[in-house]
Structure formats: C-alpha cells, structure tokens
Image (tube, rainbow, N blue to C red):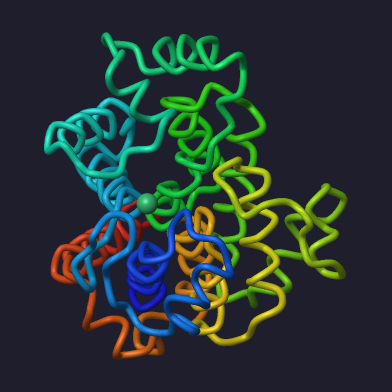
Amino acid sequence: MLDKIMGGLFGVAIGDALGGTTEFMTESEISAKYGRLTEISGGGCWSLEPGEITDDTAMTIAVARGILEKPLEPITKIGEEFLAWYGTNPKDVGITIRSVLSQYQGDWEEAAKLVCEQMDGKCAGNGSLMRTLPIALAYADNEKMLDITFRQSMMTHYDEQTAQICQIYNKIASRLLNHEQLYQAIEKEIQGTQFSSVFHNKPIVPADGYVVNTFYWVLYYLVHFKEFSDVAIEAANKGGDSDTIAAIACGLKGIEVGYNALPEHFKTKILVKEELMELGNRLYKLRVSMSS
Ligand SMILES: [Mg+2]
C-alpha cells in the first residue's frame, strides 16, 4: 500500500515535470524543438529547472497537507493550503483557480460560483482534477472519499460534471489501491459514459484544459500504453495542457506500478522528492489508522 501511495504522488510529479517543458506547444513545435522529449529537462514556457514541478503537483501537495491537518473535515485546511501556496506568487496559476483565489472571501463555494458566473458558466477546467488524487490515497472509506472529492472540486470549480469526473478518477484510484488492474478498473468506472469510446478511438478533441477533453486523453493514454514511461512521454509530446494531462494520467499509472517500479531517472530528478516522501508516509499512516 505504501508503495502504491508513493507511486501515485511521484506519478503526478513526474508527469508534471516532464510535461511542463511542452505545455502550450503543438505537436509539430515539440518535434521541431526536441525531436521526441523523453527526459525531464526543464525549460519550456515557465523556464523550469530540470525536475521543477508546477501548479499540478503544488496543489496536490496542498490537498494532501490539508487532509493530514484535519482528516475528518479537511476542506477548510485544504483552502488554507491553497491560499498559502497562492501567497508564494507561483508562476503558473490556472485562470479559474486564480480568479477564485483572488476573490475568495471566506466561503469557497460562493467564490467558485461567482467566478463561474463571471465565466458565463464555462468553469469546467481540469484544475480540480489535477490535485484530487490524495483524497483517494487517504480515505479507504468509499463514501467519505466520494464526498470529499466532490466538495474539494466545488471549492474552485462550481460545476457538477467536473466534480463527477474527479469522483470517477478517484474511484479508479481506489480500485488500484485494492490491487485491481488499471485497464479493468477504468473499464468498470467508465462503462456507459461518453468516455468509453477511448477503448476504440483516439480522441478527436484537443488536449486542452477543459476537464472533459483532458479526461478523454488521460484515459486514452492509460488504456493504450502499458509502460509508465510511455504514458508520461506520450502525454508530454502531445503538447497543449501537457503537464496537467501527464500528471493526471501518471498519478493513476504510478499507483498501479508502485513507487519502486517507477523509472529511477525520473524519480531522482524531482526536486520536491523529500516532501513527497514525507507526505506519502503520512498519508499511508493516516489511511491505515482511519481504516482500523
Ligand atoms: Mg501546470
């Protein structure tokens, strides 16, 4: 279990650090500049250090810290962690999240609702999905996990479908933690939804920050590529919202294969590895203590 929890956290960070190099680029721009990007090398539009992570991992860490501070009712603490991160003036904050964090006045859902109205209802970004994994890692109780997953999403993205996609994602993660195979776990959770087309067809939607499009690409990589490296590299070389799509996909793939099986050359590059180690250990202990 510890190996899987650690694999999930490092999966997110590796996808983020690799895909951060190619964010907002097109496939042809990437191949012209890098050939095929296969190593964590930094650079890109954020001028990243090699192994530097972006908002995807930073907010995942914030969610994990909030849960650890107050496991039975973590939303307020998660919010404090978001604000603390925002206070460090990070270089890459998504549009929806920046709007919510800058207008928050004490009630998350109220701020998220206001921002969604300001955006004419188009607030279904992937910013809550990218940080939702620690909830599945911490809570073995399915009902509790689904409740917190939903509310965590609504803190910044006032959109039910977005919250439901976060729930599907964390249900897949929970199956993996219970030793189910990734392909079968996905099959069970997306049966009868619009996403089931990924088993047969490459998505025709852009690989962008709209959560529905993001999830199509995440699922596509996960059902068609067996190796962790291939999932990360495929997503990174697609460009668009590559860091977030790679982070979301590699979070699940990382749980399936476990930390020990993640490529060494990726793991050692991650600059926040000590922090992820500490959080993984604490989430593991919390999960065990809450389920006994
Ligand atoms: Mg990012």
Question: Which of 243/62 is in front?
Answer: 243
Does 36 appear above or below 151?
below
Which one is nearer the viewer's eye here, 148 or 130? 130
Q: Which quadrant would residue 110 be assigned to in this image?
A: top left
The N terminus - image quarter: bottom left
Place of residue 103 in the rendered image (x, y in percent of width and height, measured from the top left): 31, 13
Can you say whether 81 is above or below 2 in the image?
above
Q: Give the residue drawn at x 67%, y 52%.
A: 206
The residue furthest front is 32
Residue 122 position within the rendered picture, expressed as x and y whole percent measured from the top left: 61, 24
Task: In this rendered view, identify the residue nearer to me: 180 or 218.
Answer: 218
Q: Nearer the viewer, residue 129 or 47?
A: 47
Residue 259 location in percent, x, y?
Answer: 36, 81
* Residue in the picture at 30% in, 14% down: 104
Residue 5 at what x, y percent from top left?
Answer: 37, 68
Which residue is located at x 28 percent, y 54 percent? 46
